[in-house]
Image (tube, rainbow, N blue to C red):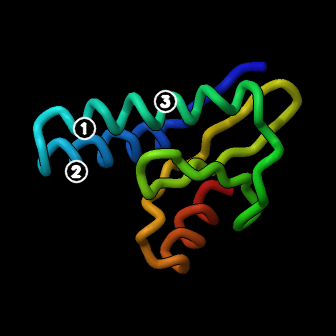
């Protein structure tokens, strides 16, 4: 199985890292470490997470972020990494743009 992080999801990770780094130096790096660990766990657990807005949603263990992904054969495509504190209608709109 392979994990593919799409460009918009990479941008989400960068923005999240910048947000936390502005709060406290070093926190942005910790954010990335935690989210990449959650993404790596998809190699084992891909497909078991509930479907939300037509994507599987894996909640981060340490931060209020969700990883939205789909599984196509042996490829896990991470579509978005979004802050769970955002309005759900914004999240739905953002994910519909990916389809």
- Coordinates of residue 13 in the picture (x, y in percent): 39, 41
Q: Residues within 10 Å of mark 1 (few under 14, many from 20)?
A: many
Residue at 58% x, 52% y is 59
Residue at 78% x, 58% y is 50
Using the image, tell me which numbered label, if any, was put on residue 92. Answer: none
SS at circle 3: helix
Residue for badge 1: 28
Place residue 30 in its image quadrant.
top left
SS at circle 1: helix
Circles 2 and 1, Cβ within 8 Å, touching? The answer is: yes
Using the image, tell me which numbered label, if any, was put on residue 19. Answer: 2
Circles 3 and 1, Cβ within 8 Å, touching? The answer is: no
- Coordinates of residue 58 in the picture (x, y in percent): 64, 49
Can you say whether 74 is above or below 7 in the image? Answer: above
Using the image, tell me which numbered label, if any, was put on residue 36. Answer: 3
**Left of 14 or right of it: where is 83?**
right
- Coordinates of residue 88 in the picture (x, y in percent): 54, 77
SS at circle 2: helix
């Amino acid at each position: 199985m392979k994990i593919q992080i799409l460009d918009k999801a990479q941008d989400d990770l960068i923005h999240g890292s910048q947000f936390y780094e502005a709060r406290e130096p070093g926190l942005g790096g910790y954010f990335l470490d935690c989210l990449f660990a959650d993404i790596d766990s998809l190699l084992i657990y891909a497909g078991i997470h509930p479907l939300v807005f037509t994507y599987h949603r894996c909640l981060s263990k340490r931060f209020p972020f969700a990883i939205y992904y789909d599984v196509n054969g042996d490829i896990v495509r991470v579509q978005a990494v979004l802050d769970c504190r955002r309005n759900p209608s914004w999240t739905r709109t953002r994910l519909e743009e990916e389809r």
